[in-house]
Image: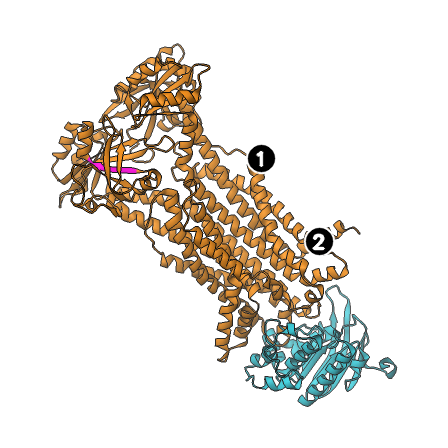
Amino acid sequence: MLELINVNKAYAGGRRVLADLSYTLNAGEYVAIMGESGVGKSTLLNLIAGLDTPDSGEILINGVAISALDDDAATQLRREQFGFVFQAFHVLPHLTLAQNIALPLLLNGATTEYVQQMLEQVGLQGRGDHFSRQLSGGELQRVAIARALIHRPKLVLADEPTGNLDPDTAHEILQLMRAEIKSNGATAILVTHSHAAAATADFVLNLTKDGLRPARSEQLA
Amino acid sequence: MNPVSLSRWLLAGEWRAHWLQVTVALTAIAIGVAMAFSIHLINTAAFNEFSAASKSLSGQSDLQVRGRKAFFDEALYPVLARHDGVAVANPVLEFDVAIPGKQQNRNDHKLKIVGIDMFRAAQISPDLLGLPAEGKTLDRLADDAIFLSPAAMEWLQVEQGDALQLYAGLQTITLRVAGGLVRARAGQRVAVMDIGAAQWHFQHLGVLSRIELKLRDGVNHAAFKAKLAEELGEAYWVTEIVDQEKRIANMSRAYRINLNMLALVALFTGTFLVFSTQALSVIRRRQQFALLRVLGFTRRQLLRQIVTEGGILGVIGSLLGLALGYAVAVLAIRLLGGDLGTNFFPGVKPGIHFDPWDAALFFTVGLVVTVLGSIIPALEAARAKPAVALRTGSEDTAMAKLSMPWFALICLLVALIFTQLPPVFELPIFGYLAIVLLLIGGIALMPRLTAWFFSALSAQWQQRRIGVVSTLALARLANAPNQAAIALGGILASFSLMVAMAIMVTSFRISIDHWLGRVLPADLYVRAAASGDLQADAQKAIAGLPGFGRVDFFRTQQLTLDVNRPEITLFARPVDQADPRNTLPLTDDMIAPGALPENTMPVWVSEAMVDLYGYRVGDKVTLPVGATPSEFLVAGVWRDYGRQFGAIQMQLADYQALTGDLSINTVAMWVRPGVSLDAATTGLRQLPFGAALEISRSSDMRALSLEIFDRSFAVTYLLELIAVVIGLLGVAASFSAQTLARIKEFGMLRHIGVMRRQILAMLAAEGGLLTALGIVLGFLLGWSISLILVFIVNPQSFHWTMELHLPWNWLAMIAVIMLVTAALTALLAGRWAVSGEVVRAVKEDW
């Protein structure tokens, strides 16, 4: 599903964040990536999503080198095959919840009938006409999850999805996200600092300056 | 760290990060202040210079005696010279003469001649004494000598000792330039000669224009003035210098105030821009301010911080505006003259003087409006609950407080009431206030109208399958109406003002064009070049020319009916008694043809006479026509765009019967079919006095009038353009500020697969839809304002009415330009929205 081949990336100031990074993620796998702040976790997600380009190396999504695509093609790929969940939710305040969730469907020219069902799945039935200002943080993240999955993406990228939530709500959201991702058969990468969050993944990788390595059990303790 | 340092840091950080918005706001304030200040400087300079030039001709007299007509019998002079309490009486004859070879420019072909008694003038008007060549002092009394001001010498291209040809009635006379008038003001074209010689050469024997009086020490001026007025009776006015100043001020007051109002409109648009810039800046930083509140910033500190920002913008912008305004004024005076091309202050070459008090006033106006523009958003930010403000999505809620439909409706209602109120001090003060209230009310109503309109549109469109771009654009406009309304306000303010001015100017121009057709029905108009008279033999010669089917003779003269007002014009001409509408451009206000009582002398008065002198149709009025004042019946009101201070038309036969004056000064001539105008003109020129005639084709006069009209409104177009530029700057500032505030939204959209061009399309759609609504509403608002300008401001300022005409093609063109410009502006402002920055913005909490 996702292949990282000798990916290198340095910041504009010259500081290298990713060096010769290689990894292969199979379809349907749900992986958590942990690592110290500044090690390049979010940069890695941006590279995978085609929002940034590596200095060298290749990133293949189902065999397609995303860094070789022009902006339109990369956007098209993202639109069809990617789902995103952000730490800060990013639910558009001027759209209703149903409209927010329907955005990927509209982008893909698909029908929006499935939105009500998705609202029910994330526990927000009957609230499709509400606006973001009427929701709590946990509810906003449910909307974000619904939006990330509504168009049945092949790869879901979640960057600290519970960073803004209390532990109980975070637990609820993580369970919901896992269940939805699994029921969709999607592949998922969860970037987090939280061991509890990481524990909901199939396995955990640790990103260091030496690359992606499976986390040892003591690191997860 | 003290609070001042923190305040400085916050300010410096904000301005460094958003220098473009700051620059736009500064530019708006500076342009607004500059326009208002420069127009004030130009008007003041031109008016002061014109007033000073007029006063220099009157010298240092205590009182002046004038006739109700332009000239009066000189027999009054010895009476006044011997009057108790009079120390010196100075007789003056003042008139204009035409210059051969200068007739091609009808607005600039005359020289003012002042005839003085040198011995008397030396005591009252020493500035008027000519400086003869050395050893030729007696030239001041010579009957062939004339003294010219430097500006007159330059204009006539003559020097001391040269011969100067002038028209005197139908003849040409030659005088000797005996010297200069060294104390004449810069640009003042005036000539001085001995009064006796002036009376003789220019056919003014036995008459004077005024007698200036210097009173003996200890004489009570007011009591003497009242006593003298009583003694002289209604045929004369006894005035002081202050009356003359009032009269000069009255002449141009409406014009000056209208121009100042237009400049203030530019300042108002600038103020709105400052408000929108500040409001959007506060919204963008709402979470920052909430954090500062959490960290311990008090409400008062926050309020002070935001108002200080506005204040500093106001100080810098106003100072820049003063400097720019001064430079513009100097340049405009140099290029266009003191009256900006309108010929309101002819022959005046003013210099701009920097008055620190005036500058302080305009600086304060600029500063106050800027601070006022900051206070509403500052209050909102200070009152916001930090916990709420820290959350994203609360921005539009914050702006909801700016949506004040009740306030808007009250403004509109009060504006409506103001349109019904009469002028104050003969100025349309309530008319202008109504315009301001309409603008404020219209803009304040925008959030509600925007939400209503786009919600309806969005609901309508949702029933169809529409794309993501349309969904996003419409949803934002419908659900974040307050932010949209701020951008809309800039468009609304500038477009409505432009529509209003365009409708007013077009209505005025078309009305004038129609009017010219009515008042210039003949093919040719002939006058004695020196504004002199055509006597019976000349009239007979003209009437006897072949080639003309009809010849009408007119007699025009100036009358003073109120010493504080400029003179009115009396036209004596043949008027079709059976139906005066065949001769005059009458309004509906008239006595029906045939209903005129017998044995009355009818007069038809201009609209200004109704406003300024209270004349009503059916009134009996007394006018100083003839040896003693006579009674006339006001038979109708006619429209006159030529004389805003009043004019009266009467039958030539009545005039001649009352005065015994058979001379005329204008001839209207209709050529027979098949006769060319060239041939007709040649016939006139071949008369013995043909060279001294001013012959004008009505088509040329019409074209010239419209040319003068267009020149007069050039400055209006300039101000209009500036208001629109400021409005577009406002659009740019609003869109760029909103784009910055929405960077996380764009970042998220880019993540989920919205393409760059789709984001740009969304921004262009938002900009286009918003501008389209702004244009529609701006048209309605502008049309309403134009009704006030056409039916209230113009009649109350200039005392004339006009028909309403809408320049549809021009309005459509401007609407399209505005639409395209605003959409492009939104696109340009949105270039950030598709940069790499937005991708990273999703990581930011704020």
Name the N-terminal-most of marks 1 and 2: 2
Give the chain of mark 1.
B
Magenta-colored span: B647-651
Where's residue B49, x and y in %? Answer: 45, 30
Where's residue A210, x and y in %? Answer: 82, 76
Q: CA distance from mark 1 to mark 2?
A: 34 Å
Q: How many marks?
A: 2
Where's residue B406, x and y in %? Answer: 52, 60
- Helix, strand or loop at disc 2? helix
Res A70 → quadrant: bottom right
Rendered position, B570 above or below B593 = above
Rendered position, A177 above or below B530 = below
Give the chain coloured orange: B
Q: Colour of chain A?
A: cyan
Rendered position, B283 above or below B580 = below
- How packed mark 2 is, by other alpha carbons closer than 10 Å (few <14, some 14-19, many 20 or more), is few
Where's residue B415, x and y in %? Answer: 46, 53
Residue at horizontal 29 percent and vertical 48 percent from the top: B513
Outermost residue to the top: B135
Specify the amino acid type for callout 1: Pro
Specify the amino acid type for callout 2: Arg
Question: Foreground: A36 or B353?
Answer: B353
Is residue B719 a member of the stretch shown in magenta? no
Residue ID for mark 2: B300
- How packed mark 1 is, by other alpha carbons closer than 10 Å (few <14, some 14-19, many 20 or more), is few
Question: Foreground: B239 or A55?
Answer: B239
Give the chain of mark 2.
B
Residue ID for mark 1: B356
- Helix, strand or loop at disc 1? helix
